[in-house]
Amino acid sequence: MHSFPTPADGAGAASILHQPPSVGSNTSSFDNTSTQVLRTPPQQHIVHTPPQGINAQPLGISQQQQQQQQQQQQQQQSQQQRSVKRPRPVKSCTECRKRKLRCDRLLPCSQCQKSSRICKYAADHDPANLSDGSDTEPVDTNRPNKRSCPPGTTNSNNASNNEIATTPVKNGGSPGMPMLEELTLRMDRLERHMQGRSPALTDTSGGRILYAATDTVRGLTVKRGGTATRFFGQHSPRVMLNVFPEARAYLMGHHQSHASDNLLRSFGLLHKHRQDELHLALKPITVFVDSMMPVQKRMTDILPKKDICDQLVTVYFDTSESIYRILHTRAFYDAYNAYWDGKMQSEFFLPQLLCVLSVASRFETKSRGMGHERSEGVHIPTACALVQSWLDSLKGKQLVDINTVQVQILLIHASRMITPRLQDSWNKLGYVLRLAMSMGMHRDPSESDQRIPVFWGEIRRRLWFTLADMDLHMSIACNMPSLLRDGDFTCKPPRNLDDSELFPGMQELPAMRPIDQVTDNQMQVYAAITLAVRMRVAPLVNRIDSIRDYSEVLDIGTKLERFLDDINHIYPRQGSYSAAQKSKQWRSRVILDMHVRRPLLALYRPLALGAADVPAEISRSFLKSSMVILKYLDELDPIQPQFHVVAEMYHQILKPDIIYCSLSVCYYIQSAVRQNSDSLVFNQHSGACLSGGHGEDLSLASAETVVPWSPARLVSTVQESLELLIKYMGGGDTKDILCLATILETVKTAEPSVQEVTRNLYAVLDSCLRSSNISQEKFRAFSSDQYGTDSYMHGQMTYGYANSVGSGGSANNLASWILWDGWE
């Protein structure tokens, strides 16, 4: 690079500009205060130009001759200098230097990695780190240190980039402008890259999102001096209770008058009675479980007659083999017919049959699978215990058989129908998912060197996506981390084909049908399309504390809402359908809708309920999704003969979602009734705005309003859901029903009265007693036996609850019932 001469008088400047250059030489410039010659590459000839001072005069002929002589002398000196090797610090490792190999200058370098040699570099000031002619110049101390490179990460691109980035300025000179500009550009790109990875701070975030208070998002129960703990997430009613301080104070006995003592004591007695009944019903039949007979024989002994089995198997394949594809219909029926013909060929069939009958018995029998008689179905606890006993007896290759995986998944579905805690199923699913991965099911069958038959390859794909969807669903429901993440598997989605198109011995799969064409596997195929986006929800919810803006949340939420719109096109509400077809169409639409809406609710929940400055679209979408789930049954005609069966199935499958969505809607009722200016229910720009003219419309409201329903409509919806929960209440539902009823009573008015709340809750208690078939006389007898000497409340420990759900209650008031004292 050349510098410009200093200003001179016009004559001197003109003489310089018109001076003819020497042949074969390049002009070199000097600093005004220094005559030091800049070192140039050996290929260039050096020409010295005298400094141009203020009194410089035009050169004469004699002066030109003297200048040419000086140029010749300088050329001779430069040639002598070139005879000395140019100093250059050695950057290669000692091994590559010995063997004269090209070194990529990493640690370890690629050459040493290939040859399994120890890669070492000489110290910067070590004489071994200098080339043969470098003793005339010190080592460049600005040269960066060698960077460590993990084994297996070296490539040509990294090597080339590393050479460019770590090459020092030659011969100790100052870096030129191109190098400075390049380094500046690199720093700018690095800063932009780091800013992209770390979300920018926003005016509304203040460095991070102000999500809802921690005690309204998660909680931890602590028992036995801290040795026994249990985690509860944002969907748990005991955590949701913290969103409603008045209801929590009422249930924890914080009121001075203790007007609710008798009421809570009565609910406590009902809870204990229903719990005892549930525990008794969940016990397997001893004569079958403890028998010394072979387990296959005991399984056969609890089967109902063939006509009952035929009916239950048909119900199972009509209702349960939808989004979770576990069994191939044709293969199962072949084995089923062979069994009744006395030609059972597989030891896996009976466990599969018992699980199928258990799932169907939960919906189709009067006893809901809890009766000991075989006249209408199987006893689910006994069937599950025998299947588990059979699984425990498997060894070796039996454990990695695909039929074993089918039995494991079916057992989780059967036990989930009666298990009070979903976390138990979540724990078992983790084992089954890892078992499937140990069998290589997370990799696509086409990757196998030993070709897997086409039929079994497609069955493996169906099973894998069933496990992946179950893992996501149960993780969100339990507020736990999911085992699988997007990108952890390469298994391709199953094809949209009927079961009749798949058979053993087939050579290739038929062409996939369009997604809008109804097949036996249509629902699972569409669920697989949405799985990648849905799988992003669980990790994001678990790190909600660390996110800094709403961009990722809104991005995932927008995609999920698009999927919801697509479902309405695949399963339209309008059409000429028969009653049976309409019911099946409704069931398919609801199953797909809830599998997409559940992650959406989980994603928006920490922000929509109690967070500050949350975008209005999050609040609108959260409320809309909650209302849609609560209004599923409104699409069916209640006078149809199958309505009550469908309603009970809806309650059985969606009971946790009904409770959770009802509590969420209560939050909006509370904000709407009290006209809280700080609530995000209302438009933040143009003031509070509630619209009651939308009626049944479930579409999103305009940008000026968040709530498209009137408070009265919201209260009516929650009240209907509460009545449904009471009508089909189970042994472990008492606390959830009391929690929801209390919250609803305290949010309906701006200033709830303790007496009014107590009076309305007594009506809820009467409804629960009627649903439980307990008369007033029988209940009084229970109360007299339990509370005659305060025996029910004596001896109970008071457990602390880290996030204030169970702490702070009246510990000395033995007459009151601590709602969340206990894990059941």
Image: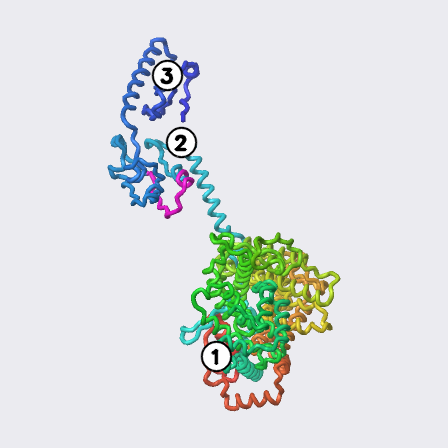
CB under 8 Å between discs 3 and 2: no
In this rendering, position of residue 425 left or right of residue 761: left
Which mark is in front, 3 or 2?
A: 2
Q: Decide: marks 2, 1 in contact (CB < 8 A)?
A: no
Per the rendering, the mark at residue 293 is 1
Q: Position of residue 320 (x, y in %)?
A: 60, 67
Tell me the residue at 53%/52% (across/down).
202
Is residue 253 found left or right of 764 in the rendered image?
Answer: left
Q: Nearer the viewer, residue 543 or 333?
A: 333
Which residue carries the number 2 mark?
A: 176
- Please, what is the three-letter code of the amino acid marked with disc 3? Asn
Q: Which of 752 and 197 is in front in this view?
A: 197
Q: Earlier in the sequence, mark 2 or mark 1?
A: 2
Whether residue 185 sits left or right of residue 767 in the image: it is left
Which residues are drawn in magenta? 142-160
Per the image, the residue denoted by label 3 is: 55
Q: How is the image coloured?
A: rainbow
**Which of the 4 image quarters holds residue 454?**
bottom right
Q: Is residue 399 magenta?
A: no
Residue 157 drawn in magenta: yes
Outermost residue toward the right in this view: 576
Callout 3 crowding tier (Cα within 10 Å): few <14, some 14–19, many ≥20: few
Compared to 589, does 792 lie above or below?
Answer: below
Give the position of the N terminus as an image quadrant: top left
